[in-house]
Image (cartoon, helix red, strand yellow):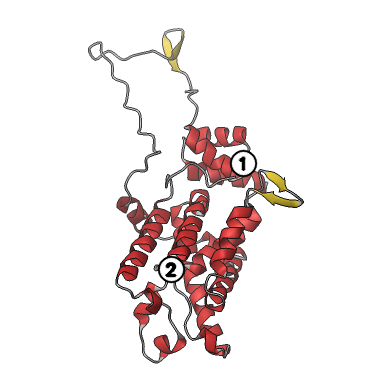
Amino acid sequence: MNGGPSGFNNAPVTRILVIACVLFTIIFGIQGRSNKLGWSYEDIFKKFQIWKLILSIFAFASTPELIFGTYLLYYFRIFERQIGSNKYSVFILFSTIVSLLLEVIAMKIVKDSSLKALTSGPYGLIFASFVPFYLDIPVSTRYRVFSLHFSDKTFIYVAGLQLLFSSWKRSLLPGICGILAGSLYRLNILRIRSMKFPEFIASFFSRLSWPSSGNIPPAAPARNTVGSMPSYAGRQVEGNNPAPVRSTVDPPEDSISTLVSMGFDRNSARQALIRARNDVNAATNILLESQAR
C-alpha cells in the first residue's frame, strides 16, 4: 500500500499545500516566532488577532511536527487523486473550518491552564483525512515482528500518533476536532460530499502547479509524410471503405498504479482507464459506481 506513483501527479492542491506549510514554517522559524504562532481564545475574541488563526493553518510549530505533518499531507494526496482536485478542495475547506469552530468551542468550554494556546499547523485537515484512510484504504500487506502484528498502514498511524501527541494537550485537541470534522464530512452533512467549486476556481491550482517529474508527455500526433494523402495504417479495409480499428494501447502504468493503490483490481483499473481515455478521476468514478451497484 502506498499513495500511488511518487511525486504530485494528479495532486496539484496537495503540492501547493505542502509547499505553503514548508515555507511558512521555515520563515517563522528563522524569525524565531514559531513559538508565537499558537492561537488562544483571547487572541481571537478579545485581541482580534485573526492573522494568528490564519497562519495556524499553514505553519507548524517545530521541525518534528513539520516532518511528520508534511509526510502525512503528502501521503494523503491519494484522496485528491481519488475524488479529484475540486472535491478535495471542498474537503480541505470543510475540514479546516469545522475543525477550527470545534476548537473555538472547546477552548471556551474547557477551563484548563495548559490550553491557553493551541499548537499551529493543518491538524484539522490531517486528522480529518484519517477517517477515509481508516474506512476506505485497504490493507494490502500484513506481517509480524516477534509476536506483534503489523500492516502496511501501521507507519501512517504511528506518524499520526506522533503528531497527535507532539505538544500533548495543545496538539491533542486540534487532532480530535479534526477527526470529528472528518466524520461529519463522511456523514455527508449538508450534502457536502457532492459539492464542488466553480471550475475556474478549481483550475486555478492547476495553473499554479508545475509539471511533476513523473508526468508522461503527450505523444505528438502522427504526421503523414507522403504529400497530403491520408494514411490508412492501422485500419481494416471492408470493401472499398476503410474502417477504423479501436486502439489497443495500454493506459500509462502510473495511472494504473494510482488506481491499484486505492484498492481497485488491476484489470478493472485498466479497463476503466480505457473507457475514461486515461483520465484518472473519471476512471475512479467509473470504478466507484460499479462497486455501488
The N terminus lies in quadrant: top right
Tag 1: amino acid: Phe
**Cα distance in 3D space between marks 2 and 1:** 37 Å
Q: Which mark is residue 108?
A: none
Question: Farthest residue toward the left?
Answer: 227
Q: Earlier in the sequence, mark 2 or mark 1?
A: 2
Q: Bin the neighbour count of mark 2 within 10 Å (Cα to Cα): few under 14, some 14-19, many 20 and up.
A: some
119, above or below 114, in the image: above
Image coords of residue 81 (percent x, y): 49, 48
Image coords of residue 116 (percent x, y): 49, 86
Question: Farthest residue toward the right?
Answer: 147
Residue under label 1: 264
Residue under label 2: 62
70, above or below 236, in the image: below
Q: Is residue 257 visible?
A: yes
77, above or below 277, in the image: below
Q: Residue at x 43, y 14 (%)?
A: 235
Image coords of residue 13 (percent x, y): 40, 55
Q: Residue at x 77, y 51 (%)?
A: 147
Q: Residue at x 60, y 34 (%)?
A: 266
Q: Is residue 192 visible?
A: no
Q: Bin the neighbour count of mark 1 within 10 Å (Cα to Cα): few under 14, some 14-19, many 20 and up.
A: some
216, above or below 285, in the image: above
Of 106 and 218, nearer the camera is 106
Q: Residue at x 55, y 36 (%)?
A: 272
| Label 1 SS | loop
Q: Nearer the viewer, mark 2 or mark 1?
A: 2
Image coords of residue 114 (percent x, y): 53, 85
Question: Farthest residue toward the front?
Answer: 146
| Label 2 SS | loop
Tag 2: amino acid: Ser
